[in-house]
Image (cartoon, rainbow, N blue to C red):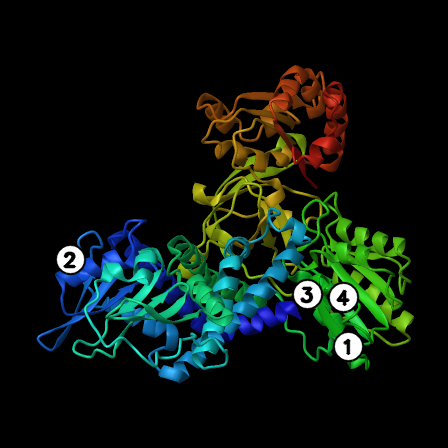
Amino acid sequence: MIRALHRWLGLPALVLVTLLAVSGAALSVFPAAERISAPQAEQAMSVADLAARIKAAFPEVEQIRRSPSGRITAYWFDGGTPASAVIDPATGAATASADPNPVQRWLTNLHRSLFLDDAGRIAMAAGAAAMLVLAISGSMLIARRAGGWRRWFAPLRGPLAGRLHVELARGAVLGLLLSSATALWMTASTFGFLPDKAAVPELPSGVSGTTDAPLASMPLLAATPVSSLRELSFPNPGDATDVFTLKTDGGTGYLDQGTGATLGWAGLSGWTRVSETIYMLHTGQGAALLGLFLGLTALAVPVMGATGLLLWLTGLKGRPRIRDNAAPGRAETVLLVGSEGGSTWGFAATLHSALTRAGQRVHTAPMSAFDPGRFSGARRYVVLAATYGDGDAPASAKGFLDRLAGLSAAPAARLAVLGFGDRSFPAFCAYARAVAAAAEGRGWPLLLPFETVDRQSPQEFARWGLALGAALGIDLELNHQPVRPEVKELTLVSRRDYGDDVQAPTAILRFALPSLSAWRRLTRRGFARFEAGDLLGIVPEASPVPRFYSLASGSRDGFLEIVVRKHAGGICSGELMALEPGRTVAGFIRPNPTFRLRRDRVPLVLIGAGTGIGPLAGFIRANTLRRPIHLFFGMRLPGSDFLYREELEAWAAAGRLSSLSTAVSRGARPRYVQHALTAEQLEVVRAIREGARVMVCGGRQMAAGVAEALTRIVEPLGLSPTILKAEGRYVEDVY
């Protein structure tokens, strides 16, 4: 509900809100500029002193005004022509013209009313209302994404556009709330909806009838400091019945021009004081630094608008449209989806369509929208959950477990949980398992036992669908057609072959970067920006299911490089190993932020065997800061599969690689990479004491051996691989 409100209000209001924000940001500069440029009165100067000096310089002066910035302006008639000037309080002389700044006047008219008078004021008020609702709903979404209000500034992950959108909102939301709320108050005041008219004293019934009392002899003027002056109007020359009118921060009064006596006084009403404070908070008049702050926060609006639009467009491409989505309160079956890249939404759309055809009322929503109060008619919940990284919640499931834990009781409607993942990864369906375990712990009744789908298998999904149909008492056929990811043709430019002597054909394949549109380059997505450790998805001709390979290069290197080993019966590896330079394959980029270089200079301990050297070589290649890197690499025979041998020697000579330890598993004295790690344990301990991060890439069996060896090495330090993982200092990319 909140996300939908934020999206569908933000999109149509984007232009109007942006116009409000940009024009407001430009106007915020003027109060500060005026405060700096205007001569200021001395702290102790009284209105009597100021008026006397100006009267001496301009005998025909009719009015003196002081703006919130402290600028003094005098108005008079010169030969029947109105004249005005900015005044130096120290001398009473003119220092500059008081003519309005034409740019400021133009911007003010644009900001207030779009040059359309009352109709324009109403339109801009609608824009301010939209900004207020967007700021409130955006704050709620940020808190939800972060895991609660207390985690408001929790680190973010995900696409750059999403992170930039939220980071700007975090910093700007207070200013936007203040600007939009005060704008609505001022609009209500303009149209007379608030009782904030300034109080004025009754006109005096009798005056002395004399004139020309010295200004210094008037007690009220002498007692009023210039700092509280707003306006002093002089009596009409030749009219002995006219009076001085003094307006200050405290109220309005009349003074007899012949005796200087105060003839009447009315203080400011509470409404007036509130309205003037609102005006100050909105415009920055009298609070230049606040105005600049509000202007700075307003500049975030166009960027947030652009990133929000980009996120929406990306979401449209990544998430299929759910047709016939029942209202949340009327749905019998609620499908909750946890997806990072969007593929799980495709399965949800297939299930939604099949259940709807079977006569069910179905509502599909992200897991982050879980709220049993909204789904009052639900008789069952079905959770389709992918896993992000090393067992984390995917983007659309953020906060689900916290909300489940916060319920006073589990829903009565029965639950089925289906996990999506890849069995080649150690955290296979870990998040979905955590959801199932948490639901069981809360006593949530089950509709089906927990099940998984490996590598987006339509067959496994269909088999699970039969079980779900049986539980519901309906015929349910799930014929899912995986949506082919958006791919680019990648041309192989070179290859180096290894491993034939040890019956393990392996190749380092280098592809040219594909041509990209200007939009892709501008948004820095996909092939426009990737790093070593990210994944290259290859879609083989014989299968719609992509296979993923860790990249040994980043976009700055100007090419795509992967290491591939041929597996018996492997569709994708067989196709890649048969590829000759000049031929193409279809591929796409998937970010892998949990296995990347960090922007720091802590030492690295890199451990890999076989094709696991790929991303590790990319890390060393990218080590332009020359941080200490210690590489442990396992191979079968040096003469057959010593991958990247020449590059490693060159990187060591250039200072990008500090040390290299190898392990040869075939030959007279077989040794594995964990043995090399143990042999160099003093160096490993020294690096870990210095805060080193351990990064492991390769087969599951190798990774288990490395973890066992590292346990023994770091135990004297009071550490373990588990502790290092919790600290973000031990990461694996295991297959």
How packed is label 1: few (under 14 Cα within 10 Å), some, or many (20 or more)? some
Residue annotated with mark 4: 371
Q: The C terminus is located in which quarter?
A: top right
Residue annotated with mark 3: 345
Position of residue 185 measured from the top left corner of the image (x, y, whole percent): 49, 72
For label 2, the SS is loop
Position of residue 688 measured from the top left corner of the image (x, y, whole percent): 64, 23
How packed is label 4: few (under 14 Cα within 10 Å), some, or many (20 or more)? some
Q: Is residue 292 left or right of residue 629?
A: left
Question: Which image quadrant is residue 77 in?
Answer: bottom left
Position of residue 334 measured from the top left corner of the image (x, y, whole percent): 78, 70
Question: Which image quadrant is residue 514 in?
Answer: bottom left
Q: Amino acid at mark 2?
A: Ala
For label 1, the SS is helix
Spatial CA distance of label 2 from label 4 is 69 Å
How packed is label 2: few (under 14 Cα within 10 Å), some, or many (20 or more)? some
| Of callouts 1 and 3, the N-terminal one | 1
- Tell us which disc is closer to us: 4 or 3: 4
Position of residue 350 measured from the top left corner of the image (x, y, whole percent): 73, 71
Q: Amino acid at mark 3?
A: Trp
Residue annotated with mark 1: 329
Considering depth in this image, is 461 or 445 the residue closer to the camera? 445
Marks 2/1 in contact by CB < 8 Å: the verdict is no
